[in-house]
Structure formats: structure tokens, C-alpha cells
Image (cartoon, rainbow, N blue to C red):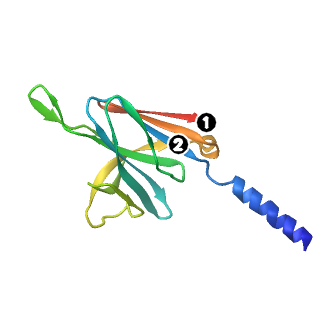
Amino acid sequence: MKRLARLTTAAVILLGSCAAAHAEIMACNNFRAPIRLALAYDSDGGATSAGWWRIEPNSCRDIDFAFKGASLYYTADSEPYKDGSKTYRDHWGNKKEFFVSSKDFKTNEANRKWRGAKPMMFSQTELSPQQQAKPVVITYHFTHGRTTTEIKFK
């Protein structure tokens, strides 16, 4: 009986050590207008997503979004801005389609149409096995026409 208890304890410790590492997410807006950010990941035959976090120009913000797996997806839209006499909006995201709401949202059904949702393209950040195994900080830098991503170990 004691041996079974020790084996069970060892199995629990081993399983606990295999859990996904925590990732902190930060978004920095190096753009001229405020942006709104949404994030997503594939989960158990579906997809989980949430948004919208507003990030002011020339500032960074911590994003409260726990994700699982090797891929984190992001999309962002700028608020309208003027350049001369024309008004523009920029969009970041071009790899995979998820469904989002125009209002703040959190859903486990981002891979299919749901009431009030619209499709939007997301770009992908891929984590290596080493980055998945340890706590990391993922920082997105949004600028005109592109996004750079930094992944650092904590």
C-alpha cells in the first residue's frame, strides 16, 4: 500500500512538471493611432479567442490571456487616422481566420460562426519546444505595415 502511495505521488509530481509553462504577453503600439488587439489559440478541436485590448500610441500594455500549445495567433486594427486629407485604418493579421465580435469578447468557438461574430484574419507566433517548456515573455511591436515579435525566457 505504501509503495502504491509513493508511485502515485511520483506520478503526480511528474505530470505536474509536464504542464505547459506560463507565457506573459505584452503588446506595444509603435504606431500613430490607438490599436485594438485580439488573441487566439487552437484548443481541443476548437479555438479559444478573446479581445479587444486597446493600446494607445507609443505605449505598451500587459495582456491577460492564458493560452495553451505552440501557436498563439493575433490580430489588430488601428482606429481611423488622417494622413493629409485621407482617412486610413491599418490591419495586422494574415495567416488564419477566426471569428470575433466587434465588442469585447471571449469565446471557445472562434473556429466557427456564432451570433454577432465576423471572420477576421490572424497572424501566428510559433513557440519552440524549449519556449513551451519554460516561462516566457512574448512582446508584440506594432508599426506601420508590420509586426515584430520578441520571445524571451523569464
Q: Is residue 19 above or below residue 45?
A: above
Amino acid on which disc 1 is placed: Lys
On residue 24, the disc is: 2
Amino acid bearing label 2: Glu
Horizontal side of residue 10 vs 72, given as left or right: right
- Residue marked by disc 1: 154
Residue 123 picture quarter: top left
The mark that comes first in sequence, 1 or 2, is 2
The residue lying at 47 percent from left, 35 percent from top is: 139
Q: Judging from the image, what secondary structure is the residue with disc 1 in?
A: loop
Asked whether, in this view, residue 133 is left or right of residue 102, the answer is: right
Which quarter of the image is occupied by the C terminus?
Answer: top right
Q: Is residue 139 above or below residue 133?
A: above
Work out whether 148 lies above or below 47: above
Q: Which quarter of the picture shows residue 48?
A: bottom left
* Alpha carbon separation for disc pair 1 and 2: 9 Å
Say if residue 35 shows up in the picture.
Answer: yes
Q: Tag 1: Cα neighbours inside 10 Å, few (<14), some, or many (≥20)?
A: few
**Crowd tier of the residue under label 2, counting other residues whose Cα lies within 10 Å: few below 14, some 14–19, many 20 or above:** some
Asked if the residue under mark 2 is in contact with the one under mark 1, i.e. CB atoms within 8 Å, the reply is yes
Residue 30 against residue 119 in the figure, above or below: above
Nearest the eye: 113 or 60: 60
Please tell me whether mark 2 sits on a helix, a strand or a loop: strand
Q: Which residue lies most toward the top here? A: 84
